[in-house]
Amino acid sequence: MSDESSGSGANKHWSGDSSIEFKLGELLREAGLVTPEHMEQMLKQHDQSGIALKDILKKEVSLTSLKALMLYEVPIPFLKNRDKSQIKSVLLESGIITDQELTRALDDEVDSEDQLGELLLSKGYIHADQLDKARSEQKKTGLPLWRVLLNLRLVNHSIIADLMKSRIGRGVSKAKEDLIIEILLNGKLISPEIIEKAQSQALNDGSSIVSVLIKNKLISLDQASSTLEKILDIPFINLSKKPPDPEMAFVIPEHVIRMYKILPIASSKQGLLLGMVDPLDDIALQKVRLVTGQSVIPCLISSMDWEKTVTKLYSTRTPKGSVSEMERKLREGTRTGSLSNEDISAVQLASSIIDGAINASATDIHLEPQIPEMRVRYRIDGVLYDVMTVPKHLELPVVSRIKLLSGMDITEKRRPQDGHFSMELLDRVFNFRSASIPTCLGEKLTIRFLDEARVMTGLQQLGWEKEELDTIENLIKKPNGMILVTGPIGSGKTTTLYAALNQTNILNSNIITIEDPVEYRLAGINQIQVNPDIGLDFRSGLRSILRHDADIIMVGEVRDAETAIVATWAALTGQLVFCTLHTKDAVGAITMMANLGVEHYLIASSLIGVVAQRLVRKLCSHCKTFSPPSEALRKQLGWEDDPKVKIGVAVGCDKCFQTGYHGRTAIFEVLVIDHEISNLIAGNASDDTIRSIALHKGMRPLSLNGIKKIRDGVTTPEEVLREINL
């Protein structure tokens, strides 16, 4: 979809309706209770019949689904979270549910938790005695059942998240299932009574109605495949006639294949052909897209065929053909020269985890030991998402493989370690920085992706507005002085400094950096890695740099008084010095330098500019829509006089893994130290005084730049408010 087309029709209709009905429609769509296509159908029905939109929606969305939406508490990946009070307000104000119905729904919370417990039992995740123990503990603590189950380590985060999403997300496939049911009923292939029972079981099991009907032999496989192909273009594949490519068995981790009853069959330019016992399982589809980075073409396979094929494929676990570059690297270093079956599983699983993170454009992988399994999470656009779990028996082999690849000591498990490795994948050079730390449940491993393409950029690619870009480009052309880049950890400060260095004259300048660690290698620049073990810290390294005739110096982080003082003197004696600090805004950097022991008159004489920045997620260009903001938000953003303004809305699609966001951009604030502000600093003026003068002189604060990003449809108010106060 284009930026406008995905919601143009809906916006045209909604804008004519009351704001609350628009909010209701967005809420139900974001929760997956109606699809965008189904929404368009209902809007047309509203236009043609004159029936109130809320009454149409009430027929399409069950009270059970609304109750699940209200009781939903577990934060899960790929589903937009909303505050319960906001949800309640929209549901009540729209009239889709009455106050009495909502009260009854909330009073049924115990019943809902009983359903969760029964669902865990039916799927074999817990035993009856474990559920009894959890319910007993719940009475003592008053905590929700899901939280008690996690605290008792009877289930992991991934299981709870998937089950809860399955329950609330049944509406994602509701329009599809309605069509399937209609075909089955019209063809007299099944009775309404059987459909009703199957729907009840599907709701309790968290599975699709097609899966329930086939499993209970209420319809034949031929009838199901014919209906799916006719309605959803989902073909049936007989695995005995069209067996899967054996190499494809290793594209997805074995335990993921067994968990979701799926099977990769073949890969083509169109995408990955995926056999599924339940082809309407949206969670399984999302997991496969994330791990493989490919478009997925679902097809129906029989449960019996799946069982036979999986057993045969994994009876010999060594792939006969070529393996990925990542897997080859993970196989290296084996002492015996051969791998056991468990080693092969660990190698393939570790390879899938890393390859999947690359495909998902993740920046970090977190392998976190839990009970009963290891939790695997990706950080994508600054947000952590649960991706999969690693079985306990593979936890140590997987961690050891990655430690071996990173050059760590695999026999040392009691002390933190750091390591790194590099390789060329997908025609790109990746540097991986890994770190291990012991926890009470085992070693936690974090892998950071250092993609050189992300920093081989100019300043204009980072999201600067024209005024701030012109200002910073003028600052980095100055022959001497100090430029500070501030913000919290993970706000992109190093990327900004690298981009600034990329725009300096490396042919005629001697540029030296001191960093911990050196994350990216920059051509033509001398980079020093801090090494405290031999006494090379920021202080001693910076003092040494001053004896090497540097024109430009970059200090990765000013952490102590001596580093701050030496950097200040370097700026005073003819060098251009870039440094990073952790402060909330640009003016706060002045106070921070003073707190580190630098005299105010030295700050005033050396400092030429301060950049404060934050990172926010960008709306996905393939699925974002636009809608009018609420009256309260319009007032908060200063748009009271512009009733026609529309803002971007995160929707979610396959391209962005249903998050509604893809990529990040920066919000900047640039403080230029001119003669007047320099005098204020020397006179120890307060932050408020300096900020007031700077704003009067034209400094645009973070909040204004954030609002402009919202107005331009680059990001959403929720994203900006997550980083700064408006």
Image (cartoon, rainbow, N blue to C red):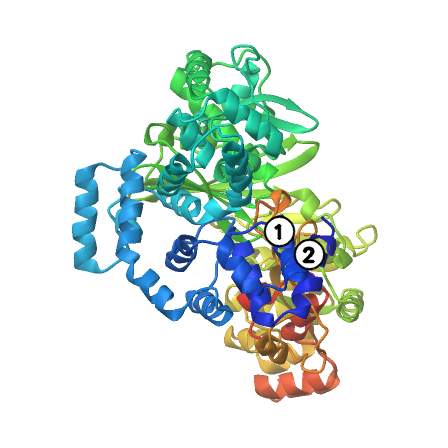
State left or right for residue 430 relative to residue 479.
left
Question: Mark 2 highlights which residue?
Answer: 7
Q: Residue at x 76, y 64 (%)?
A: 476
Crowding at label 1, few (<14), some or many (≥20) Cα neighbours within 10 Å? some
Q: Describe the element under mark 2 as helix, strand or loop.
A: helix
Q: Position of residue 593 (x, y in %)?
A: 56, 74
Q: Residue at x 42, y 14 (%)?
A: 308
Q: Amino acid at mark 2?
A: Gly
Q: Which mark is residue 36?
A: 1
Q: Nearer the viewer, residue 399 or 189?
A: 189
- Whether residue 553 appears in this view of the structure is yes
Q: Position of residue 690 (x, y in %)?
A: 63, 85
User: Is the residue under label 1 in contact with that under label 2 (CB below 8 Å)?
Assistant: yes
Q: Residue at x 53, y 30 (%)?
A: 187
Label 2 or label 1, whichever comes before in sequence order: 2
Q: Residue at x 26, y 51 (%)?
A: 148
Q: Which mark is residue 526?
A: none
Q: Position of residue 469 (x, y in %)?
A: 77, 66
**Above or below for 211 versus 99:** above
Q: Nearer the viewer, residue 678 or 495?
A: 495
Crowding at label 2, few (<14), some or many (≥20) Cα neighbours within 10 Å? many
- Within the image, what quadrant is residue 322 found in? top right
Q: Position of residue 220 (x, y in %)?
A: 46, 22
Q: Amino acid at mark 1?
A: Pro
- Whether residue 533 appears in this view of the structure is no
